Image (spheres, rainbow, N blue to C red):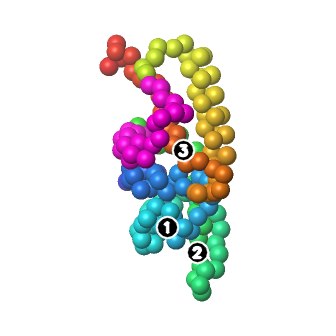
Amino acid sequence: MSLGDASGQAAMRATAHPVRLRIMSLLTGAPMTAAEVARELGLTHANASYHLRHLHAAGMIVVAGEEKIRGGVAKRYRYDRARDRLSETPEQKRALFATLGHELIRRTATGQFESKILLGDGEFWIEPDKWLDLRRRFMDLLGELHDAAQPPRTPGTIHTSTTVAMFEMESPDEQ
């Protein structure tokens, strides 16, 4: 196994765990220490540290700084949405989609569905130029959403869930 293969395997294992997806979501709004992640997600400090180490080793999160806390040094981690994920293999992407499916089930347990819900799903046949335009616009909106994210429980914010999955499918005659 080459170094690239080892890195790819680590990324696949890192993203294929629901707790790690939740951690990456948390780290979008603000850099956090293992203790802060543990408190927010109801984990032990050791468990949060374990998951953060795996995410960092896989290149899914970055160290955003260090600070002295009670005689020790705590690392602050953040999710860097700008990192290039184009190197993921199809298997890694499928594992991520499967994990996201389970994560959506968890999130909907606390969802408020009386109003302000947006849900869309479909398999569409669309012209390539239109597809690229729509994909770019969705990417811009997701970037704006990530940029607007605040630390958990910031006064004046609401807790939301957003998942977007867009990909080209094989045509029936290509299968």
Which mark is nearer the camera, 2 or 1?
A: 1
Which mark is nearer the camera, 2 or 3?
A: 3
Q: Quadrant of residue 10?
A: bottom left
The residue depicted at 42 percent of the width and 71 percent of the height is 44
The mark that comes first in sequence, 2 or 1, is: 1
Residue located beneath label 3 in the image:
160
* Secondary structure state at the residue bearing disc 2: strand
Measured from the top left, where is residue 124 in percent x and y? 46, 17
The mark that comes first in sequence, 1 or 3, is: 1
Q: Which mark is residue 56?
A: none
The residue depicted at 59 percent of the width and 48 percent of the height is 158
Identified by mark 3, the residue type is: Thr
Q: Residues within 10 Å of mark 1 (few under 14, many from 20)?
A: few
Identified by mark 2, the residue type is: Ala
Q: Quadrant of residue 101?
A: top left
Q: Is residue 38 above or below residue 88?
A: below
* Secondary structure state at the residue bearing disc 1: helix
Q: Which mark is residue 74?
A: 2
Labelled pair 1, 3 in contact (Cβ < 8 Å): no
